[in-house]
Amino acid sequence: MSNAAQPVWDHAAATPDRTALNGTAGQSWTYAALRDHAAAVAARLRAAGIGPGARVLLIAPSVPEFVAAYYGVLSAGAIAVTANTMATTPELEYIGTDAGISLVLGWHAVSPAPAAAAAAVGVPYWPLRPELDGLTPPASGPEGPAAEPEGSATAPEGPVTAPVDVAPDDTAAILYTSGTTGRPKGAMLTHGNLHACASIFEQVHRLGPDDRAGTALPLFHVYGQACVLATTMRVGASLSLLPRFEPQEMLALIRDRRLTTTAGVPTMWNALLHAAGDADPADFASLRLASSGGASLPGEVKRAFEERFGCTIMEGYGLTETTGSATVQVAERASAVGSVGAALPGCEIAVRALDGTELPAGGIGEVHVRGPVVMKGYWGRPEATAEVVRDGWLATGDLGLLDDAGELHIVDRKKDLVIRGGYNVYPREVEEVLYQHPDVVEAAVVGVPDDHYGEEVAAAIALRPGATADAAALRAWAKERLSAYKVPHLVAFVDALPKGATGKILKRAIDRAVFDGASG
C-alpha cells in the first residue's frame, strides 16, 4: 500500500498540466504545481528533523495551501493532525498536548490561537501564506520559536523526490472528535483507510479525471478531507474550493466552474434552495452528482433541491471513525425515502440490540460498521478504542434499522433520543415533519428535563423572513401529522441554529434557556 499522498505525485508525473486545484480570486494549481508545493513542505519538515511518525498540527481553511501542507506532511511520512480554524487557544493546546505534536502549521489569516497554542505546548509555529511554496517558517519571535535555526528550515538538504514509503496500517491523520461526551479523542486514520475511502467513492460514483468537483466543506473535517479531497486527488480530477460556505458564492462556483459533482451537508442544500431565487436551472445543467453527509437530510429538502436544480442528491452515512464513509445511495438503485443507502463495497452494516444480538430487518438498534474504512483506534486511548471496536466492528452510537433491501435508515443518535413519559421520541422523525411546514427553514428537536414526563419534547425553529412566529399554530399543524406525544410541547423561535464547521446543526450548543416559558 502506497502513501496516501502518492496519487498527487502520480498525476503530476503522468499529466503535469492537468488542473488539480482552483481557489478564490482566480488561483489555479496544476498537479505538477501541487506536487512541487507539497515536496517543498516535506523538504522543510525533513530539514527541521520532522519525519515519519511525527505529528504536525495543521490549522487552515479550505484553500490550496491547506492541500499542499497536508500532502507535504504525509509525503514526509509524518501525521497530519487537522483542527478547526475556529478553535480557541485552549482547545488547540489540548489537541497539541494530547497528540504530542512537534510543529504547528497555521494559516496566516487565522486568529492568534495557533501561534499561542504552539507557544503553550513548546513547539515551533510556522505560518502558511499564499506565496511560492505556501510555507514561511519564522525565526523566533511573536509568532513562536522555530525548531531549528532559520537557515536549516529554509535550505533543506536536497529536494524530496517521492513520498516516504509507509505500511497500510501506518497512521496518516488524526482527527479529533467533537467531544460531546468527555474530552475530544483523536481518531487515527491510516494510509489504508484513506486509500480505501477514495477507491470506494471512485467506484460507486463513477468518478474520473474529467470530473470537476467543488465544495465549501472544511478540509480539516473528515468529510472534506477523505471523501472529497482524497477521492478527487485519486481520480486526477479538479477540485474547486471555497474557504467558507456562502450560498451565492457556492451557486456561482457551480455555474462558473461548470461543476459535475459537489458535496455538502443538509444546511448547505437548504441554504442554496433559499438563495437560488430566479436562477436559471440551465446554469446548473453540468451538475450530475450532489453528495450529502454529515447529518440526516430532511426528505422535504432533498425533494425541493432535486426539483429546483435537476440534480439528485445522493445521501451517505459515515463517521470520523469510519473515514467519513459507511453507506451511500447510488444512481443505479432507487432508495426508499429516509434511507442513507446500502453498505459501501467492502463494508458491512449490522444493527444490534443492547445485548449485542444482531436484529432482523426492521429492528431498531445500534448501528455497527466493519470494513477497510474503520479507524485504527483512538490516539493514546486503548481502553476507549476497545469500548467501540470489537472484532473489527465499530459501534457507532447511532440508532438505525436495515430495511428488507439492506438499506440503512438512521433513526437518531442514541444520546439524542427523547424519552417522554416512557415513550421513545426520535427527534429526526419530528424534524422531518417540521421541515414540511412552508415557513420553517431550520428545525432542531431536543429533550429538556421535565418533572412530570422525565423529558419534554422541545423544538428550536428558524423561520423564513417575514413569517409569523406562532407556536400554537405550529403545534396544531404538527399534531395533524404526528402522534400527540411526539408533538413539541416547547417551541422557541430563533434567528438561526448553532452550527459546526461543516454547517451541521449542533444540538448540544442550543441554549436550553430559550425554552423557558415556551410552553404551547
Image (cartoon, grey):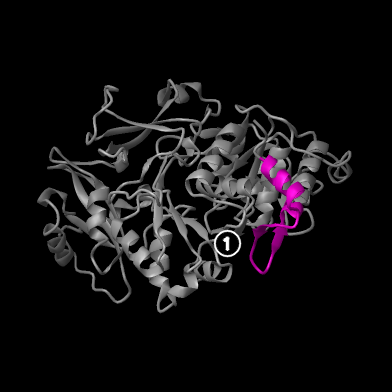
Assess disc 1: are there few (<14), some (14-19) or many (≥20) residues with their C-alpha within 10 Å of its C-alpha.
many
- Whether residue 414 is visible here, answered yes or no, is no
> On the image, numbered disc 1 is attached to which residue?
242
Is 392 colored magenta in this rendering? Answer: no
- Whether residue 386 is visible here, answered yes or no, is yes
Res 96 → quadrant = top right
Is 14 colored magenta in this rendering? Answer: yes
Residue at image x 40%, y 36%?
A: 181
Question: What is the x, y in percent for residue 491?
Answer: 22, 59
Res 369 → quadrant = top left
103 or 47, nearer to the observer: 47
* Extreme residue toward the front, this view: 332
Question: What is the x, y in percent for residue 94?
Answer: 56, 37
Quarter of the image with the N terminus is: top right
- Is 383 left, or right, of 130 in this rendering? left
Residue at image x 78%, y 48%?
A: 137
Res 2 → quadrant = top right
Question: Which residue type does callout 1 highlight?
Answer: Leu
Q: Which residues are magenta?
A: 5-34
Q: Secondary structure at mark 1?
A: loop
Question: What is the x, y in percent for residue 453?
Answer: 14, 42
Quarter of the image with the C terminus is: bottom left
Q: Is residue 159 above or below residue 264?
A: above
348 or 203, nearer to the observer: 203
